[in-house]
Amino acid sequence: MSDRLHSEPALVQFSERLTNSAAFGALFREGMDLVEETAAYLDGVGRSEAKVLDRSVSLTYATESMRLTTRLMQLASWLLLHRAVKEGEMTLTQANREKTKVKLSAADPSPEEMLLKLPEQLQILITRSMVLQTKVRRLDISIHAATTTHAPIGNPLVPQLNRLKAAFER
């Protein structure tokens, strides 16, 4: 019985349950909605707003809209990958291998005084994408926490407690 408590599948099941949680479902919907909203803005109102910006602000607009688009594409990739786990289309182990292609690190933003010159809606979308990225990074740590941390004999809960701790750290 103690061998079963220390086995890896129990840890994987805990991680897979996170992708089946209501929190993941809400995060998925939030991410996909933000992708759609951003695309609509950049193809519509944002394009018009960009045309009337000063040259220096226009360069910041182009840079930040590219960063925003890239960030959202990476987040959407991560979310879709983990939805595939939820739907049983792939295992968490397969997703773990595939997620190495997804970059969840944040690029350094432009100086704040330049960001404040951007159209308000773009500023809001950038902020929302950064908040979403923080949430996804936290969940990623929880789901894919290293399983090399083995519990001391007699306490099989330590790896799972470490995952919970990592989920709530910033």
Image (tube, grey):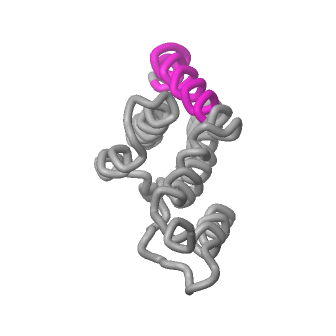
Asked whether residue 55 is in view, the answer is no
Residue 35 at x, y percent in the picture: 51, 27
Q: Is the magenta region chiefly helix, strand or loop? A: helix
Q: Is residue 155 left or right of residue 71?
A: right
In front here: 18 or 130?
18
Q: Is residue 127 above or below residue 153?
A: above
In front here: 140 or 87?
87
Does the magenta run of residues contain 126?
no
Residue 1 at x, y percent in the picture: 56, 69
Does the magenta run of residues contain 34?
yes
Outermost residue on the front side: it is: 1
Asked whether residue 27 is in view, the answer is yes
Residue 126 at x, y percent in the picture: 56, 41
Magenta region, residue range: 28-50
Residue 41 at x, y percent in the picture: 54, 20
Q: Is residue 74 left or right of residue 129?
A: left
In front here: 38 or 30?
30
Residue at 43% across, 52% down: 104
In front here: 132 or 7?
7
User: In which quadrant of the rendered image does the C terminus lie?
Assistant: bottom right
Q: Is residue 62 left or right of residue 120?
A: left
Residue at 46% across, 36% down: 85
Residue at 47% across, 26% down: 50
Residue at 64% across, 80% down: 155
